[in-house]
């Protein structure tokens, strides 16, 4: 898998995880721990951070302090069966 595919896979995994756990508040450190094989691995931490930033930029996640929440649009697409 090339780096771009890996990034897209992480974004999808992160979005599914946040939606599955909603309405629980998940912090960045929680997401890194839960989505990384090794939370101490800098490359894996960076992959989660990139996914968070990309999904926020695309309007699918929002940040509330250190916490990450799905946007209404992401939750709606989930209800439609798209995620």
Image (cartoon, rainbow, N blue to C red):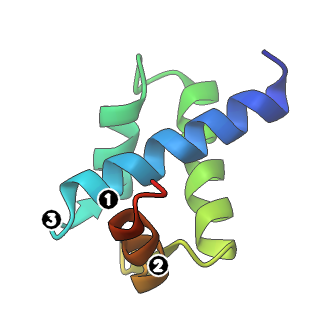
Depth check, mark 1 against mark 3: the one in front is: 1
Observer-nearest of 10 and 31: 10
Is residue 40 found left or right of 5 in the rendered image? left
Q: Can I make out residue 74 in this image? A: yes
* Rendered residue at 41%/18% (across/down): 38
Residue 31 at what x, y percent from top left? 35, 46
Residue 24: which numbered mark, if any? 3
Compared with 78, 2 (above or below) is above
What x and y, as percent, mark residue 23? 16, 70
Q: Secondary structure at mark 3?
A: loop
Q: Residues within 10 Å of mark 2 (few under 14, many from 20)?
A: some
Work out whether 21 lies above or below 39: below
N-terminal label among 3 and 2 = 3
Q: Which residue is mark 2?
A: 62
Element on which disc 1 rests: helix
Tell me where residue 70 appears, x and y as whole percent.
Answer: 39, 72
Along the line of sight, the residue nearer the viewer: 31 or 7: 7
Name the secondary structure under disc 2: strand
Q: Which residue is mark 1?
A: 19
Mark 1 Cα shell of 10 Å, populated few (<14), some (14-19), many (≥20): some
**As drawn, is 28 to the left or to the right of 58?**
left
């Amino acid at each position: 898998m090339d780096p771009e595919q890996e990034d897209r896979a992480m974004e999808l995994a992160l979005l599914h995880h946040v939606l599955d756990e909603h309405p629980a508040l998940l912090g960045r450190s929680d997401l890194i721990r839960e989505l990384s094989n090794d939370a101490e691995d800098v490359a894996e931490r960076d992959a989660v951070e990139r996914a968070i930033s990309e999904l926020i930029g695309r309007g699918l996640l929002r940040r509330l302090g250190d916490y990450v929440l799905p946007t209404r649009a992401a939750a709606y697409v989930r209800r439609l069966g798209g995620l």
